[in-house]
Amino acid sequence: MADHSPIHVGLLFSKTGDISTIETSQLMGTLLAIDEVNAAGGIDGREIIPIHYDPQSSPGLYRVLAERLVLEDRINVIFGCYMSSTRKAVIPIIEKWNRLLFYPTLYEGFECSSNIVYTGAAPNQNSVQLAEFMTASYGVRVYLIGSDYIYPYESNRIMTDLVLQRRGGEKVGERYVPLNAVHDDFKSIIADVKDKQPDFIFSTVVGNSTKCLYQAYADAGLDPRTMPIASLTTLEAEIAQMGADVGAGHVSAAPYFQSIATPRNLESLEKFKRRFGSDVIPNAGWEAAYFQVHLFANAMRLSGSDAIDALMPNLLGSEFDAPQGRVRIDPSNHHTCLYPRIGIANGSGQFTVVRQAIRAVHPDPYLITHSLGDWTISLDTPK
Amino acid sequence: MVGQKNTTSELLRSLRTLSVAAFHPADEDGEELLLQLRRIGCHAQAFWPPAPRLPEGADVVFIAVRPDTAVPNWSEDRDARAPTIIAIVNYENPTIVDMVLKLEVHGIVASPIRPFGLLSALVVARQIRNSRAAMTKQVQRLESKLAGVRHVAEAKAILMRARNVSEPDAYQIIRDQAMAKRTTVEHMAYAIVSANDILFR
């Protein structure tokens, strides 16, 4: 007799706290995909039932709730985490109990847990392309502003290394703010920026304080046409928080932007809007959260079990037609082959894609010395 | 706020050029080791059992220390250009730890191998090997310097006795001879001491 019991999966995305906006969008991307899988008959007739907890943007709660999902809810697969600090908090739990985490966020690299599938960009899939574009288009003097935790430190190391490869390349400033930074925290930094006059700013500020940086920048009368803020984390959701007029002209790199005009992407966006309305704004985190559920469902159709040892051989090397393009999990490092893109925020709160990869770029999470001018990672200008 | 370093250490930068020989049985652990070394970007190859001589051309050697396999004696090959050696252990009892001590390794990795921690172990072991090599070189330099000083003092004493001259004059004689023979003062002094041994003892 066929097994028709539902499959419970765990979701750890914060609906409250400093990173609630981006994680809520990841939660909704996850729910959209679960909806799609269930509407198509589930996994061989078995319905996916999500169990979601709100870790309130606190690493300690991620650990506690991950353990609750494993021990009380008997969950084998967890989808979640945005900040590296929260992923690091969950790792000991999933490794101890041998469970699987799908992590839908770009991060700084240098990790490859056998219990994680990483579906966001590694630095060789966004930082290098962003540095190439910024130094070629705006100049080689950079000012670094970041939230005070590990992702900004490492991303800034990479950006500095890349900028210094350019003739005359220079880091003119480097400042960090707390994760819950408000408008006033950026005032003295922006004053310093005005004083140092970099060619561009690289922001690794994440979460809800992102809007404060961009607003402080706008209030100071700085001009994105000559000194834009470049970022890997300021995406459509953050632009909506700060206002399209404040965000316009700034530059971001990501494998996905809402504005990708393929039928595949439009279909997902349309479906999402119809099902969940327009309060939550799709972005690269949303898209990775969305496609990783489908990668899981497809693998489980083959394995018939959601135990990690059964799933993993079917996950590694598997492919899926995601909104950004056809993605593939690299079997050697559990990260994902993705399509780097550069977007400039426009007046309607969307990103105009100005550069894009024609083929997927392989993840290389342990790359220490990135090089500008590497043709394997060079991007095309969309026609 | 935290000031970050803006230049990455050469020990990290050079990881992608490293040639690594891994002496490890062909099992799941060995595969994990090789896979992680390749993720890091090293040129890694695996062998088992351990070779009797240290492999030439390798920058780093991993060696699984197993109770049932004798550890090779590589001490003769351990010159200034010898590679970094890292032991992989699956037991921690005195027998195994003793085998590890005999190998004089620069680092240790626990089995079962997890990807996390290997990069740090590798980089720190290389730092230890490099600083140990630099110190050995320094010690050798100091030792030969010290021997030279001792020979000069002895040669001066011999000349002062034989030619009845003052210490500065004795030194001047050695120096002039060294100049004339286009050699160093230390070398000249050594010649005088050796000749004195043969002629007068």
Image (cartoon, coloured by chain):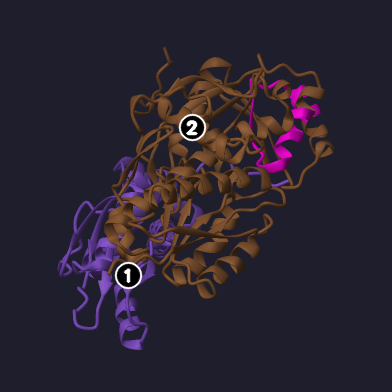
Chain colours: A brown, B purple
Give the quarter of the image for residue A377.
top left
Give the quarter of the image for residue A48.
bottom left
Q: Please report, as a chain letter, where disc 1 is located.
A: B
Location of the C terminus of chain A (image quadrant): top left
Q: Nearer the viewer, mark 2 or mark 1?
A: 2
- Residue A96 sits above or below residue A79 on the image: below
Q: Which mark is residue B154?
A: none
Majority secondary structure in the magenta region: helix
* Magenta-drawn segment: A190-215
Do the residues at discs 2 and 1 belong to one chain? Answer: no
What amino acid is labelled 1 in the image? Ala
As rendered, which of A116 and A298 lies closer to the eye?
A298
Name the residue at 58% across, 38% down: A156
Position of residue B169 in the picture relative to residue A301 (left or right): right
Quick one: label 1, few (<14), some, or many (20+) residues within 10 Å?
many
Position of residue B100 in the picture relative to residue A161 (left or right): left
Q: Secondary structure at mark 2?
A: loop
Position of residue B1 in the picture relative to residue A93 (left or right): right
What amino acid is labelled 2 in the image? Tyr
As rendered, which of A39 and A30 lies closer to the eye?
A39
Image coords of residue B78 (percent x, y): 27, 63
Residue A134 forms part of the magenta stretch: no
Image coords of residue B172 (percent x, y): 44, 48
For disc 2, the marked residue is A256
Count the numbered circles shown. Answer: 2
As rendered, which of A7 and B107 lies closer to the eye?
A7
Residue A48 visible in rendering: yes
Name the residue at 52% across, 31% down: A270
For disc 1, the marked residue is B87
